[in-house]
Image (cartoon, rainbow, N blue to C red):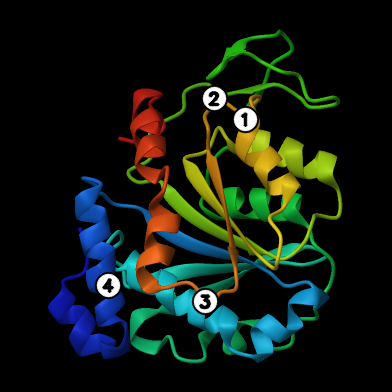
Amino acid sequence: MPISLDKVESTAPGLVSLAKTAKVSLEKRNLFGSKAKVAVVMDYSGSMSREYSSGRVQNLTERILALATQLDDDGAIDFFVFDSSAAYLGEVPLDNYAGAVTRLTQGRRMGTTDYAGAFRTVRDHFGFPPPQVVTTEKKGLFGRKKKVEGAVDVALPAGLQPANEPVFAIFLTDGAPNSKPQAVQALIEVSTAPIFWKFLSIGAESFEFLQKLDDLEERVIDNADYKPIGSIDALSDEALIEALLDEYGEYVTEARRLGMVV
């Protein structure tokens, strides 16, 4: 169950207004009361330096934390970064969120842009099993698969037990990955885990590759949605929440149908 607005106000008064906005948006989509574990997965490549030093990544993280209070009752979000590798750095808690991004990234060196490592690190952190590899062509969610060259077909792990809640992973980047084929394969693999990926890009132009990931047909389930947001600061709270929640409800419905979540 979500954290009450009274508790949010007493613990983190600076987030209560956005938490109210999140509650209204969830209610509109008939999602209020549904549970999810919320995670942020942040690009820590060198080109993102100004986004961190300016506080914009901290700002976005706080806004996501406000949304998380209405989806998750543990009062924290999980914080991951990806650069030349990917790592889980800890939690951003409701009762100590100020300056959390700086604390968690302290001592880490910026690098390149390992999408594939990020996808697998999040899956492994939450304890979801790897996929079953299949060698025969099967029909996917959208009919006959359009084979991505070099991609390995996957299926849900044998004996998969449904998770109590999905993971809602919000993935922010400003550039393409180190290896596009590896990123494609990794997203296909993690489609067998109950994780919904919300891809956000910053910058003047949308990313064709993130849209490609959004549209991949080789996945067991459509596990991602892409939204170019341009500037973190330019997006209103209402617009951000709407962008984050778009397609999430449809994912949860399909994940339940497939037995991935209860």
The residue that disc 1 covers is: 131
Q: Earlier in the sequence, mark 1 or mark 3?
A: 1
Tag 1 secondary structure: loop
The image position of residue 67, as x and y in percent, is 34, 66
Q: In this orientation, does residue 239 appear? A: yes
User: Is disc 4 surrounded by few (<14), some (14 to 19) or many (20+) residues within 10 Å?
Assistant: many
Q: Earlier in the sequence, mark 3 or mark 4?
A: 4
Is there CB contact under 8 Å for labels 1 and 3? Answer: no
Tag 3 secondary structure: loop
Q: Give the quarter of the figure containing the C terminus.
A: top left
Q: Nearer the viewer, mark 3 or mark 4?
A: 3
Which amino acid type corresponds to the residue marked 3 in the rendered image?
Ala
The residue that disc 3 covers is: 234
The residue that disc 2 covers is: 156
Does residue 199 appear left or right of residue 3 in this picture? right
Q: Residue at x 57, y 38 (%)?
A: 129
Which amino acid type corresponds to the residue marked 4 in the rendered image?
Ala
Along the viewing direction, whichever of 151 and 198 lies nearer the viewer: 198
The image position of residue 125, as x and y in percent, is 57, 55
Is there CB contact under 8 Å for labels 3 and 4? Answer: no
Q: Nearer the viewer, mark 4 or mark 1?
A: 4
Which amino acid type corresponds to the residue marked 1 in the rendered image?
Pro
Is there CB contact under 8 Å for labels 4 and 2? Answer: no
Is there CB contact under 8 Å for labels 1 and 2? Answer: yes
The residue that disc 4 covers is: 19
Label 3 to label 4: alpha-carbon separation? 19 Å
